[in-house]
Amino acid sequence: MVGRLTAKGVCHKELYELCAKICDECATKCEGAENNFVKDCAAACKKCAASCRVCQEDCKKCEK
């Protein structure tokens, strides 16, 4: 959903904030796993959270 809105040029900073929070929680739960698939999931979640924060900051710039 975040990707679709972003692709359409819709800026919704609250959605980006929520997405980052969810991804952070997922990454935290998966970080200590021994399974490579779960470790990859944690890394992807961290990357997603970082991207959502960038989008959130970009929204703030557009509001000015």
Image (spheres, rainbow, N blue to C red):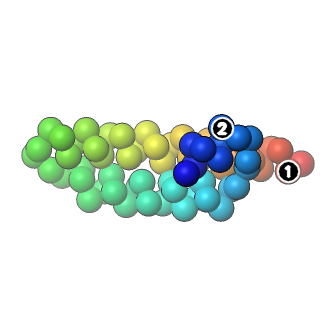
- How many numbered marks are there? 2
Look at the numbered discs 1 and 2 and tell me whether their residues touch, using CB distance below 8 Å.
Answer: no
Q: Give the SS element for disc 1.
A: helix
Q: Which residue is drawn at 65% across and 42% down?
A: 6
Residue 13 left/right relative to 43: right
**Three-letter code, disc 1:** Glu
Q: How packed is label 2: few (under 14 Cα within 10 Å), some, or many (20 or more)?
A: few
Q: Residue at x 24, y 50 (%)?
A: 31
**Three-letter code, disc 2:** Ala
Judging by the rendered image, the residue that carries numbered circle 1 is 63
Q: Which residue is drawn at 73% across and 49% down?
A: 11
Residue 50 left/right relative to 4: left
Viewer-nearest of discs 1 and 2: 2
Asked if residue 55 shows in the view, the reply is no
Question: Viewer-proximal residue, 18 or 10?
Answer: 10
Residue 58 left/right relative to 26: right
> Which one is earlier in the sequence, the residue at label 1 or at label 2?
2
For the residues labelled 1 and 2, the Cα–Cα distance comes to 18 Å
Judging by the rendered image, the residue that carries numbered circle 2 is 7
Query: Seen from this angle, which residue lies furthest right?
Result: 64
The x, y position of residue 17, in whole percent, is 59, 58
The x, y position of residue 10, in whole percent, is 73, 47
Q: How packed is label 1: few (under 14 Cα within 10 Å), some, or many (20 or more)?
A: few
Q: Give the SS element for disc 2.
A: helix
Q: Residue at x 32, y 40 (%)?
A: 43
Mark number for residue 22?
none
- Quarter where residue 47 is shown: top left
